[in-house]
Image (tube, rainbow, N blue to C red):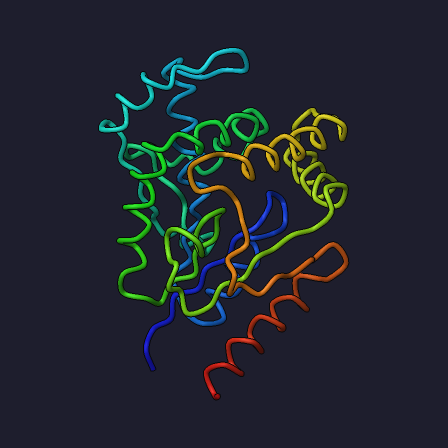
Amino acid sequence: MNMLTIAIDGFSSTGKSTIAKLLAKELSYVYVDSGAMYRAVTLHAMRQGLISSNRFDREGLINSLSELEIRFEYNKELQKGDVYLNGENVEGLIRNLEVSQLVSLVAAVPEVRRKLVEQQKMLGDQGGVVMDGRDIGTVVFPDADFKFFMTASPEVRAERRFKELQDRGDSISYDEVYENVINRDELDSTRKDSPLIKAEDAVEFDNSDISIKDQLRAMLDIISSKLTE
């Protein structure tokens, strides 16, 4: 059987990464977290003083892109791929709220998207890949074998993200997280280059009230039924 390419897109905090990891594990495929790549670029920009809450040196970021090397390396202990920025494991550093608040600005820069989309296409050339993000089914893999689009209410997504940050020990309020969710939705959906939209042939899941287990089963059923048609 040919190795499939599976694209999962959707809004922030809809559990894209969680379901993509589980799906990849079930199928014995490679999981690629495209959002982590944009977060790594954002961390780089922050470290270089190119972006903060009140300034963004777009040209400086664009000029520094040639310095970036982003790759994934399998973590045997955690059984997942960690993202590396110029040889440094930054998996734990790219998940905080500060990066979350700035990543949509970085992801909207066409030069950044072109660089990372090129890398993402290379990762999926051979198939056997589950990749999640904002434009995987529309830009990165428009011919993907299967496309899924995930959504949930802003309140549910903010609550999920708030709990995740609390569990990590971050000092943050629900209102701050909710505002971040709304702002990211606006930025992701209205950017000129590769906005977040549902591909016409994607299957949509509203997982506001559905468990990860049930969603995984539904996705596997869709894949299985189409393969046996």
**220 above or below 117?**
below
Measured as percent of width and height from the top left, residue 123 is found at 30, 55
Looking at the image, the residue that sits furthest to the left is: 66
Instruction: Decide if residue 3 is on the left or right side of residue 103.
Output: left
Instruction: Decide if residue 64 is on the left or right side of residue 36.
Output: left
> Which residue is depicted at the point 41% across and 53% down?
32
Of residues 91 and 53, the one nearer the viewer is 53
Q: In which quarter of the image is residue 106?
A: top left
Location of the N terminus (image quadrant)? bottom left
Q: In which quarter of the image is residue 175?
A: top right
> Which residue is depicted at the point 55% across and 74% down?
220
**160 above or below 57?**
below
Of residues 190 and 12, the one nearer the viewer is 190
> Which residue is depicted at the point 46% across and 68% down?
146
> Which residue is depicted at the point 63% across and 35% down?
168
Measured as percent of width and height from the top left, residue 67 is found at 24, 27
Looking at the image, the residue that sits furthest to the bottom is: 229
